[in-house]
Image: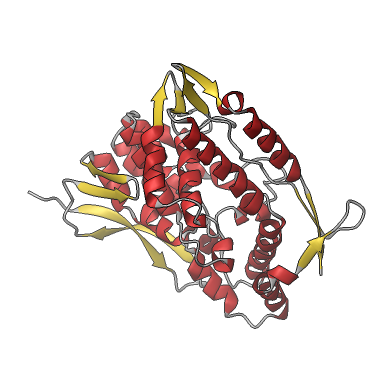
Amino acid sequence: MNKKFYSLVLAASLIGGGAFYLYWPVSVAKPHSKTVQTVYGSVEVKEPVLLELLESAAFERLKGVNQYGIMAFVKPEQKYTRYTHSLGVFYLLRRFGAPLEEQVAGLLHDVSHTTFSHVADFLHNSIQDKYSYQDSIFAWYLEKTGLLAILKKHGMERVAQFGNGVEYKMLKADLPNLCADRLEYNIYGGYVEGWINEEQMRAMVDSISYQDDQWMFKDASLAKQFAKISVDLSVQNWCSAQNAFVSTAMANLLKRGFALNIITQDDFHFSTDQQVWDKLRASDDSEMKKLFAMIDNQETGYGKGTKEKHDLYFKGKFRGVDPLVLSNGKATRLTEVDPSFGDYLKECGASVKEHYIAYL
């Protein structure tokens, strides 16, 4: 017999114009299984903890949070959400035999991303302080959204301490190593950019193995193709002056929106990109209009400054990888198998160390 269960829902508060979260009884038939579809393949999920998390409003919200944050409004063709990414990470962990708890951590690892994703790091200056804002609020976010209650119900509350004394080796690893998170956002990122197609994506996944606590490639040519994607994404996207310029403008828009009570902290943490964007865009405030103009006309809004004269300084995190490759039965770094790639990795890493940006 199907049972009724309580689902987390988002409710808009008419008092004060804010937003709040609460448990609301919803009569829904509890699923016995669910097929999770990803571009890499599909998996059947039957574990109750996973089913509840997948059906939660907090996880569904990630459909409205773009992987590239504000850049998705600059380049709307970049269709890639935190929801797609999280399911992809979950798929990799499940396919390669991660324990259930680590699969749960993989599914939830990005759930605490605010609207516009890493714009939060520009807002809180956590890029310069070398931490991720969404990681710093992870446990708090799970509690606020009711996800912690689900984890506790299934004896998996340890997941809430991920990154705070609890680590999952398959999910996260330090650069230049591979991990499920890094594998997914680079493979799908290469697809979004049009550098590889779906067949090539799946070929990369088929070439991956996990052994001796390490992810590695069985094919050196695919390892190099993947590693080049990681470098190019860093240079062209994450560490670019364009990203810094647009994300800083968006962070200033959010600050102005908070100051004028156009948006609330709840909107920022629990809403979606489009909802917050529309609220800010509707304002007649002259300062906000100038900031939107900076984003709209970003191609001509900035240029190269100097250390002595600049409006914005940015030092991004270079995310180029040096994956392990199975060579003659031994795990070897790609840069040892292909020294020319090592030169390319160093050159590109040095080129994005810092930006001095001048506003035009």
Of residues 268 and 199, the one nearer the viewer is 199
Of residues 111 and 161, the one nearer the viewer is 111
- Is residue 85 visible to us here? yes
Q: How many marks?
A: 0
Q: Horizontally, is 30 left or right of 83 in the view?
A: left
Q: Is residue 255 above or below residue 331?
A: below
- Is residue 174 visible to us here? no
Find residue 45 and report its horizontal and vertical position in percent: 23, 42
Find residue 305 and report its horizontal and vertical position in percent: 85, 58
Of residues 337 and 293, the one nearer the viewer is 337
User: Residue 246 falls in which quadrant of the image?
Assistant: bottom right
Q: The C terminus appears in which quarter of the rendering? A: bottom right
* Color scheme of the displayed model: secondary structure
Of residues 150 and 135, the one nearer the viewer is 135
Find residue 260 and report its horizontal and vertical position in percent: 65, 73
| Residue at the far right in the pictured view | 308
Q: Horizontally, is 180 left or right of 264 in the view?
A: left
Q: Horizontally, is 124 left or right of 163 in the view?
A: right
Q: Is residue 70 above or below residue 174?
A: below
Find residue 169 and report its horizontal and vertical position in percent: 46, 27
- Which residue is rendered at x = 64% and y = 28% of the image? 339
- Which residue is rendered at x = 66% and y = 49% of the image? 235
Q: Horizontally, is 90 left or right of 75 in the view?
A: left
| Residue at the far left in the pictured view | 1
